[in-house]
Image (spheres, rainbow, N blue to C red):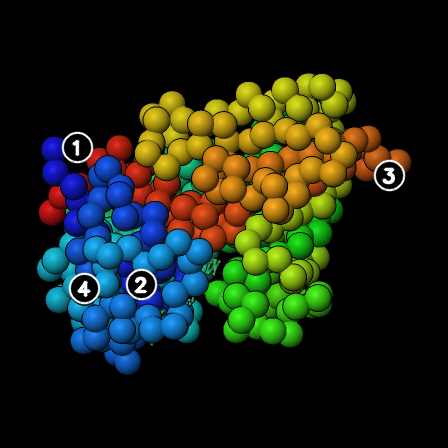
């Protein structure tokens, strides 16, 4: 790329926003020129607006400290400075829907981490290794919005990333019944142990809205384009329980699967480790070289040892074995704020840039 694209981060002071900024610090294609947040942060230096809320383990990049935070709601002012934006604002669903559409209508593509538009019929929800063909729906969306280059694209929920890629690798064996329990890290709620002390040595068996997302979002990813909408798949049936556990980063999933077609354990493992998608073929900057690794030790994958596999963009699987009631069971692990949030959105943006959906204004 001759010249880096100019990027804005909406919700830049929050946890996911901080993750975006950290990932974009030395990005070969993108340069952050706008950090935007709520009116209470607007006008402040980024470092002052964040104050003691910096949640990354690496220090705040110097390049961002003196940027003056803009107000997310000043859509035209932000849009005039950038080629596209990442969205990680925490507002009501209706407010997020409206503001992301407002940005798209200024001819500014929006790659969003939020759930607000995940079921908008012509908004693609994509894991680039699984369903990049859904980005084609953007043409229908642009017609609806009346735009030439503005659109919204989203990534799915963090909870599904430890098992949906695995089930996708096994698609030809036709998984038809799946039982999942997720063990989800506290950073998924934008928290650390410092700001959520009740989570120390604790388990909370409820995460608002998460079970529905975990059961339904994989079906939309496996759906197809029909006219001007994405029609979700109807199989496999997934039932899920989501549990918050005292882990900082890393969502683990314990999964049982029934297959229509008989398959050996060796073949299932082969499908996982050989899985390659378009991000690997296109050699996108944030694409993991190996999307899924299989660990043979009985005590893996472990959060402490495996969550950062492929810079947090890979999925780790282990303990695949036959089951007495289902066909197989396994454990999956993925990084919830990297693959599951900012990293997943960044990979979508890279794919969209490689395919000329996102260009310089
Ligand atoms: N954490 C995760 O792993 C994760 C994963 C998937 C999806 N998500 C979703 O991503 C979004 C951000 O999550 P987070 O954990 O980063 O939240 P967060 O730490 O609370 O950050 C929220 C951001 O939104 C801004 N904001 C809040 N109210 C606003 C308003 N009225 N107008 C404009 N900006 C406003 C905040 O600005 P100020 O600092 O100025 O208040 C801040 O920059 C949420 O929708 C969340 O559900 C999070």
Mark 2–mark 3 Cα distance, whole angstroms, equals: 47 Å
**Disc 1: which residue:** 1
Name the residue: 58% across, 30% down. 293
Tell me the distance, in whole angstroms, between the alpha carbons under discs 4 and 1: 25 Å
Q: Considering only vertical position in the picture, is 42 above or below 63?
A: below
Mark 4 CB lies closer than 8 A to ligand 1: no
Closest to the camera, between mark 2 and mark 4, is 4
Frontmost of labels 4 and 3 is: 4
Q: CA separation, marks 2 and 4? A: 11 Å
Disc 2: which residue: 12
Residue on which the image places disc 3? 325
Where does the image place residue 148, in percent across and percent down from the top left?
Answer: 16, 47
Tell me whether circle 2 and circle 1 mark residues in contact (CB < 8 Å).
no
Mark 4–mark 3 distance (CA, rounded to whole Å): 57 Å
Residue at 49%, 49% in the rendered image: 340
**Do tag 4 and tag 3 residues touch (Cβ < 8 Å)?**
no
Task: Classify mark 4: helix, strand or loop.
Answer: loop
Residue behind mark 4: 67
Q: Secondary structure at mark 2?
A: loop
Q: Residues within 10 Å of mark 2 (few under 14, many from 20)?
A: many
In the image, ligand 1 is in what quadrant? bottom left
Marked residue nearer the N-terminal end (3 or 1) = 1
* Crowd around label 1: few <14 · some 14–19 · many ≥20 (10 Å): few
Query: In this orientation, which residue lies closer to the viewer: 19 or 221?
Result: 19
Residue 94 image offset from top left, x and y in percent: 39, 71
Position of the N terminus, as image quadrant, is top left
Residue 235: quadrant of the picture: top right
Q: Which numbered disc flags the more N-terminal residue, 2 or 4?
A: 2
């Amino acid at each position: 790329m001759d010249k880096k694209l100019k990027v804005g981060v909406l919700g830049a002071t929050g946890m996911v926003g901080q993750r975006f900024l950290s990932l974009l610090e030395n990005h070969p294609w993108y340069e952050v020129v706008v950090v935007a947040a709520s009116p209470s942060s607007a006008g402040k230096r980024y470092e002052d607006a964040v104050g003691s809320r910096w949640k990354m383990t690496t220090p705040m990049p110097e390049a961002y400290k003196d940027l003056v935070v803009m107000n997310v709601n000043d859509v035209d002012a932000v849009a005039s400075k950038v080629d596209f934006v990442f969205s990680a604002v925490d507002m009501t669903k209706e407010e997020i829907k409206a503001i992301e559409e407002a940005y798209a209508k200024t001819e500014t593509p929006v790659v969003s981490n939020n759930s607000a538009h995940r079921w908008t019929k012509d908004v693609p929800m994509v894991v680039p290794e699984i369903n990049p063909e859904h980005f084609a729906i953007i043409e229908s969306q642009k017609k609806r919005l009346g735009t030439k280059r503005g659109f919204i694209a989203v990534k799915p929920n963090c909870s599904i990333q430890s098992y949906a890629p695995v089930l996708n690798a096994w698609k030809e064996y036709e998984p038809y019944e799946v039982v999942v329990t997720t063990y989800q890290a506290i950073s998924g709620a934008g928290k650390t142990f410092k700001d959520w002390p009740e989570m120390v040595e604790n388990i909370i068996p409820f995460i608002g809205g998460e079970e529905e997302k975990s059961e339904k979002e994989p079906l939309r990813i496996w759906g197809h384009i029909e006219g001007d909408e994405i029609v979700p798949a109807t199989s496999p049936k997934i039932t899920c329980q989501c549990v918050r556990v005292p882990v900082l980063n890393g969502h683990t999933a314990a999964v049982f699967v029934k297959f229509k077609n008989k398959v050996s354990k060796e073949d299932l493992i082969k499908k996982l480790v050989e899985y390659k998608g378009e991000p690997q073929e296109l050699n996108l900057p944030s694409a993991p070289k190996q999307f899924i690794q299989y660990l043979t030790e009985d005590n893996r994958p472990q959060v402490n040892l495996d969550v950062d596999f492929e810079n947090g963009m890979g999925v780790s699987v282990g303990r695949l074995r036959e089951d007495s009631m289902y066909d197989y069971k396994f454990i999956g692990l993925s990084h919830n704020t990297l693959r599951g949030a900012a990293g997943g959105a960044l990979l979508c943006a890279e794919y969209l840039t490689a395919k000329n959906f996102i260009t310089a204004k």
